[in-house]
Every structure is written in C-alpha cells, then in structure tokens.
Image (tube, helix red, strand yellow):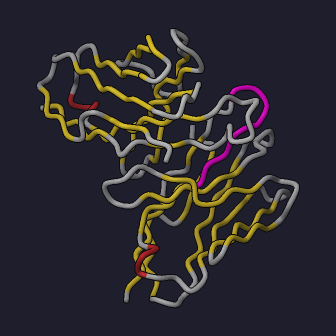
Amino acid sequence: DVKVTQSSRYLVKRTGEKVFLECVQDMDHENMFWYRQDPGLGLRLIYFSYDVKMKEKGDIPEGYSVSREKKERFSLILESASTNQTSMYLCASSLPRRSSGANVLTFGAGSRLTVL
Amino acid sequence: QQQVKQSPQSLIVQKGGISIINCAYENTAFDYFPWYQQFPGKGPALLIAIRPDVSEKKEGRFTISFNKSAKQFSLHIMDSQPGDSATYFCAASIRTGFQKLVFGTGTRLLVSP
C-alpha cells in the first residue's frame, strides 16, 4: 500500500522557535506537497516539489521554507514560528504528470502544530 | 482568492437519505475535478473524480454530476450511511503543466443513525 508518513502527529512549540515537519513517502513518487488545513479555509498549498532539490511556491508560502534532499523526503520548515501558524499540516505525494495516476494525491495523516 | 467554492459547510443527513454537496469553479481551464474524503485523524483520500467530457460519473453509492456551462459540479451520496460521516473536499486542477490541485473549503457530513 502506498504510504506517506509524517513523523510528528502533534507538536507544541513557542513563538519564535524553528520548527521542522518531516514527511517520507515510500512510493517513489516524484511530486510532493505541503498543505495546511484550517476550518472554513480548506486545504491551502504551501510549497510543492517535482524533483529532488526542486521547489515551487504554492498559494501561501510566506513564513515557510522547504527542503527536498532525497526523493522520498520532503521537509517543511518554519524559521520562526508564529501563533498564526497553528494549524494542521498535511503532506502529500503523487506521480509525475506523464503518468496516468498523476492527479491522485496520497496524503499523510497530518501534523497538528500548536504555537504558543 | 477562492477559485473553488464549496457548500454547504456542514450537513446532517438521516441514514438512508441522499447527501448532496455542491462546488462551483471560476477557472475555465480546469479539466479535472476530484472529490476527497477525510475521516477524523486521517489525511484526505481520493473518493471519485470526473473529467469535463462527461456529465456524470457513478461509483457505487457515490455520483459526481458535472455542469460545464454553469461551472458547477456536485457529489451525491445515495443511501447515506453513518460510515460516510466525514469531511468532503472538492477540488479542481489543470491536467497540462504541473497539476496543482485547488481545494474547496470542505463539507463536514454527519449521517445520523
């Protein structure tokens, strides 16, 4: 079974702390994504990556950065956490666009971050 | 800006009833419309999807109806069951180029026994 694993299910951090959210997929997918999910706002794309060391800004990249040093791992970094970054963070992966399953996102279970 | 508008925000349906969730989009370049289902504590998972060359797609009790001229699509859940209680997200993307999905705001469905 296709799997996307987010290492931390729940995190509590203080304002100004640096936060790393890790995501690993075991499907050899080329595309990886970070979304945040907030009530009433749905899923909003923060960053995505279509290859190792490649990254593209999504719709709400401010305050975030990402790292993709290996194909299976995509990290979301909050350089200086703020209270408005309290949210559920979802990682996803998909096949490249040339593949028949390219439009299907496989999501992890999410990381709920609280910034105090 | 919200490119995919979803309604209602929440929905309560009796067991055996029909659940209907609606979405409207603005970008006429969208050509792929999936629905994702999310149970508490889990990530969203693809439920059913449609391309605009058909007006309806059915998979079991789940049906997508698509109206290209109105730029609207909807999810119908027939014979709704308590196990269908979840949050549902519609989405849209463009197949060519990088397939970035744009999601609706979600509908929390509760099917009462």
| Of B17 and A15, the residue lying toward us | B17
Q: Quadrant of residue B70?
A: bottom right
- Place of residue A43 in the rendered image (x, y in percent of width and height, measured from the top left): 47, 43
Work out whether A22 lies above or below A16. below
Query: Which secondary structure is most common in the magenta stretch?
Result: loop
- Place of residue A61 in the rendered image (x, y in percent of width and height, measured from the top left): 45, 21
Check residue B97 for magenta coloring.
Answer: yes
Say left or right for B88 vs A112. right
Quadrant that contains the C terminus of chain A: top left
Work out whether A39 lies above or below B37. above
- Place of residue B50 in the rendered image (x, y in percent of width and height, measured from the top left): 74, 56
Q: Quadrant of residue A104?
A: top right
**Residue found at the very far front of the displayed protein:** A1
- Place of residue A107 in the rendered image (x, y in percent of width and height, measured from the top left): 46, 43
What's the residue at 37%, 21% (across, down)? Answer: A75
**Residue found at the very far right of the displayed protein:** B53
What's the residue at 69%, 40% (across, down)? Answer: B93
What's the residue at 53%, 13% (across, down)? Answer: A52
Say left or right for A80 vs A23. left
| Of B75 and B24, the residue lying toward us | B75
Say left or right for B43 vs B103. left
Per the rendered image, the range of residues in magenta is B90-98
Say left or right for B101 vs A9. right
| Of A1 and B100, the residue lying toward us | A1
What's the residue at 29%, 39% (across, down)? Answer: A111
